[in-house]
Amino acid sequence: MNSQALSSFLWSVADLLRGDYKQSEYGRVILPFTILRRLDCVLAATKPAVLAEHAARTQAGLNPEPFLLRKTGVGFFNTSALDLPTLLGDQDHIRQNLYAYLQDFSPSARDIFERFDFHAQVERLAKADLLYLVTEKFARIDLHPDTVDNATMGSVFEELIRKFAEISNETAGEHFTPREVIRLMVNLLFIEDSEVLAPGRAVVRTVYDPTAGTGGMLSVAAEHLTAHNPQARLTMFGQELNDESYAICKADMLIKGQDVGNIVCGNTLSDDGHAGRHFDYMLSNPPFGVEWKKVERQVRQEHELKGFDGRFGPGLPRVSDGSMLFLLHLVSKMRPAVEGGSRFGIVLNGSPLFTGGAGSGESEIRRYLLENDLLEAIVGLPTDMFYNTGIATYVWIVSNRKPEDRRGFVQLIDASGFWQKMRKSLGSKRREMSEAHIATVTRLFGDFTEAEQVTVLDAQGQPVGEPRLVTGTDTAPLPPEGGRLKRVPIARIFRNEDFGYTTLTVERPLRDAAGAVVLGQKGKQKGKPQPDSALRDTENVPLCEDIATYFAREVLPHAPDAWIDAEKSKVGYEIAFNRHFYVFEPPRSLHAIDEELKAVSANIMRMLGELAE
């Protein structure tokens, strides 16, 4: 059964709930019941052995838990003889029996249903005489991993969450990230690690997501690694704030045989659930433009008391957007370079690229990344890619183990044109990246090359054939006679310092009513021209340019009496992504426009004449 058919079936349960439940409340029933049936099916094959083992170990006075976990092989168990199908055999006592069945799950699995507040829904369903009908619906569907694999199950959860979020006016994007975006990020993380991807090498690596949602990023990372190297083992870690998303993620990890103790519930910024840990790989899609006022006290306290020994040493962004705090959090989780280092990918909107002038928290964070040579690449994604927003988004790849040829450089890739239209829009998501698009971006990153998209135009300026991607080693096509080539940069490479600048404070003297320069009368200012605050100005000088030379060329010819207040100079960094990919298109000549207007006017007059005949 594919994910569409399966989610349609599960959605049909809503027909039973209609009237007794509001549409916005359907998820409170359907999601936990889906998880319960999934766990039910996973344990079905080992249930007889588990029951026998439980009886034997209990009779011997031993703690049965480790023995039962070994029997199931999936990190959880249930010691009840019941399951969903057998619950249907006693309709009059289904509520009590369902409670007993839930209570006999191991603590890690029981916590999932507590996060959903499932008992409250069972009571509500029982009062509405719906408990048996809903249980019957789920008991009849087979969710065994042999029938529905983990990838399909993940897609089902995503589809259900998206629907529930839409009808309750919530933000689906808070819960999960589009699968193709995750695949792109995972490709970029792993492409340079041939040792990990080489088949036959039994390597063990860790991956972490501080905004885990339903666990999609962790799952795709594991699937990618296993597909290339079945002997490799990826241990997953995560933290999630939303209880229901955490419950789904935890259920997914349980079924995969992961240690669910590695998935923590709570606010990552105020209460780090993995304090002191470092990871090989990390992925994150933090919320965009969400203020961090609720955790401001804890974050500022850590910044001020711990400094660079804490997570937020480089600086704090404005309270209205906390996405860069997650960036700093991931930097703090990087394994030291001497121990192998780390690489992570994070999805951010455009604001962290340029918000804040020199000396601001945002600029200081960018400065820390670039001056410590941590930023490897930024990939601009197409708009309308996410379920909850149509704005431009960017994937930042950060690493403290750059290959030799990348050291001191940052690669920018503009993949905003790499998309195809979806057959059906999902919320704000109208576009998707195909496998070919993902492969192209991955290749550009892996080859660490600059590239252009070249379109051949004929003499009339019309495109001939499809645009072609040309890298530094490729030969560009030849234009036809009278035609030309339109070149649009797709990938560019910059030195770290190319993004830096020094903000100079330029002063001019204060003058009295007679026009004479006012001089200081006391202290260090005695005999020196006093600045006129009304004439004060600032200049941003690129780091790669000499300040004195710039000042003599750009300022003194226009203000010979100006000087620089060196004490106020600040170094800042910004990444004007779009500016680096802008291509100026000269307007057509006035003669060409005039000729076209004449031709159009003549055509209109001809058609009017035909109508008058």
Image (cartoon, helix red, strand yellow):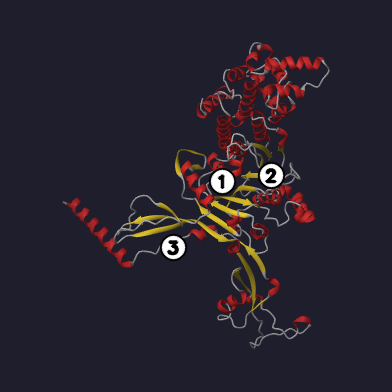
Q: Report how far apart the C-alphas of labels 1 and 2 lie in the structure.
A: 17 Å
Q: Which quarter of the figure has residue 108?
A: top right
Determine whether label 1 and label 2 are within 8 Å by CB. Answer: no
Q: Report how far apart the C-alphas of labels 1 and 3 lie in the structure.
A: 34 Å
> Residue 327 location in percent, x, y?
66, 50
Viewed as shown, does residue 101 lie left or right of 457?
A: right
Q: Is residue 155 above or below residue 40?
A: below
Between 81 and 131, the residue placed more toward the observer is 81
Name the residue beneath numbered marker 3.
Answer: 584
Name the residue beneath numbered marker 1.
Answer: 191
Between 308 and 168, the residue placed more toward the observer is 308
| Amino acid, disc 1 | Ile
Determine whether label 1 and label 3 are within 8 Å by CB. Answer: no
Residue farthest toward the right in the current orientation of the protein: 61
Name the residue beneath numbered marker 2.
Answer: 279
Which numbered disc, 2 or 3, marks the residue that appears first in the sequence? 2
